[in-house]
Amino acid sequence: MKIQWKIKSFENLSVNELYDILRLRSEIFVVEQNCVYLDLDGKDKQALHLFGEFEGKIVAHSRLFKSGISFDNASIGRVVVDANYRDRKWGHDLMREAIAGIQSHFGESKITIGAQLYLKKFYESHGFVQTSEMYLEDDIPHIEMKRE
């Protein structure tokens, strides 16, 4: 069985989809990364939510933003894959779907992200280049990256 990708606005997410997305983000960004931070930053309502379902479970997610919300360019954020499925390389599929989603839904090709530093090579493999020095966000090293 393959992963099935969906893109929905905040308003079109079901209560169960929203709960499962927020749970997945908390499992990875708060528990796995041992980082206490406020995931609910007020931007979910402005995002398109890209998520992948496998066997009835949401196993991947990212937020897509048009330009002017997170950065001057369109952006992708909260990129996450369930730890139990990372061996399937669905993170790469997620990024391809996210880039395509930005282009098809917003008509934009320039994308800026705030990437965790340890994922630099991963994002470079999708055409992003580092455009800032390292900075700390929630005590985790990050860099800004852009894709033209």
Image: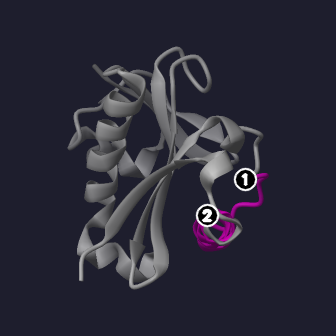
- Mainly helix, strand or loop, the magenta region? helix
User: Could you tell me the amino acid type at mark 1?
Assistant: Asp
Label 1 sits on a secondary structure element that is loop
Give residue 100's mark: none
Above-or-below relation of 114 to 31 = above
Above-or-below relation of 79 to 3 = above
* Residue 141 point in image, percent of width and height: 55, 44
**Quick check: marks 1 and 2 in contact, CB under 8 Å?**
yes
Residue situated in front as seen by the camera: 28 or 47? 47
Q: Residues within 10 Å of mark 1 (few under 14, many from 20)?
A: some
Location of residue 98 (image quadrant): top left
Give residue 25's mark: 2
Q: Which residues are magenta?
A: 18-39
Residue situated in front as seen by the camera: 96 or 103? 103
Identify the residue at horizontal 30%, vertical 65% (top origin). Answer: 90
Q: Residues within 10 Å of mark 2 (few under 14, many from 20)?
A: many
Q: Quadrant of the C terminus?
A: top left
For the question of whether residue 81 can be seen, the reply is no
Identify the residue at horizontal 45%, vertical 77% (top origin). Answer: 83
Q: Quadrant of the N terminus?
A: bottom left
Q: Is residue 28 magenta?
A: yes
Q: CA distance from mark 1 to mark 2?
A: 8 Å
* Residue 103 point in image, percent of width and height: 32, 29
User: Could you tell me the amino acid type at mark 2?
Assistant: Arg
Give residue 39's mark: 1
* Residue 119 point in image, percent of width and height: 38, 50
Identify the residue at horizontal 65%, vertical 64% (top origin). Answer: 14
Q: Is residue 41 left or right of residue 123?
A: right
